[in-house]
Amino acid sequence: MLAISLPADIDTRLDDLARARGMSKAALVEEAIVAHIEDLEDAAQEKASLETWLRADGVAAYDRMQNDPGRALSIDQVRARLRAKREGPGIR
């Protein structure tokens, strides 16, 4: 069980929204909290995935680039390659 106090303006907005959706305030708050927790969990998973990729692949790519700077592409070359991929067959 959780009890919270809300500022009057938020409580009024919550009342209005609950009434408009035909829900109790408690059900609406629970729905909002669940949705927010899911968003936070998704963000944490994305961060963990990015960190894993950086450790596994990003560092190795950086090291290869440091060892052979001639492999580097200019931003224009990168854009051209991305444009070609987008315009390639099967991609619309």
Image: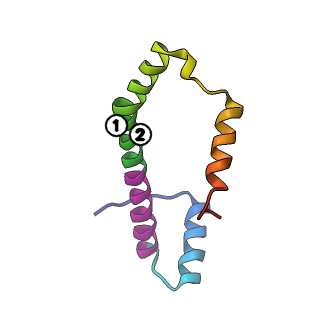
Quadrant placement of the N terminus: bottom left
Where is 53 relative to 3, above or below? Answer: above
User: Mark 1: which secondary structure?
Assistant: helix
Q: Nearer the viewer, residue 55 or 35?
A: 55
Q: Are marks 1 and 2 in contact (CB under 8 Å)?
A: yes
Q: Residue extending furthest right?
A: 76
Q: Is residue 35 left or right of residue 89?
A: left
Q: Residue at the location (51% across, 86% down)?
A: 22
Q: Residue extending furthest top?
A: 67
What is the tally of numbered marks visible in this picture? 2
Q: Residue extending furthest left?
A: 1
Q: Main secondary structure of the magenta part?
A: helix
Q: Residues within 10 Å of mark 1 (few under 14, many from 20)?
A: few
Whether residue 4 is visible to the viewer of this picture, yes or no, is no
Alpha-carbon distance for marks 1 and 2? 5 Å
Question: Magenta includes 40?
Answer: yes
Q: Which residue is mark 1?
A: 52
The image position of residue 72, as x and y in percent, is 58, 23
User: Mark 2: which secondary structure?
Assistant: helix
Q: Nearer the viewer, residue 4 or 86?
A: 86
Q: Residues within 10 Å of mark 2 (few under 14, many from 20)?
A: few
Q: Which residue is mark 2?
A: 50
Q: Residue at the location (40% across, 53% down)?
A: 42
Where is 42 relative to 73, above or below? Answer: below
Q: Nearer the viewer, residue 24 or 37?
A: 37
The image position of residue 17, as x and y in percent, is 58, 75
Q: Amino acid at mark 1?
A: Thr
Q: Please provide the residue range marked out in magenta.
A: 26-42
Question: Magenta includes 88?
Answer: no
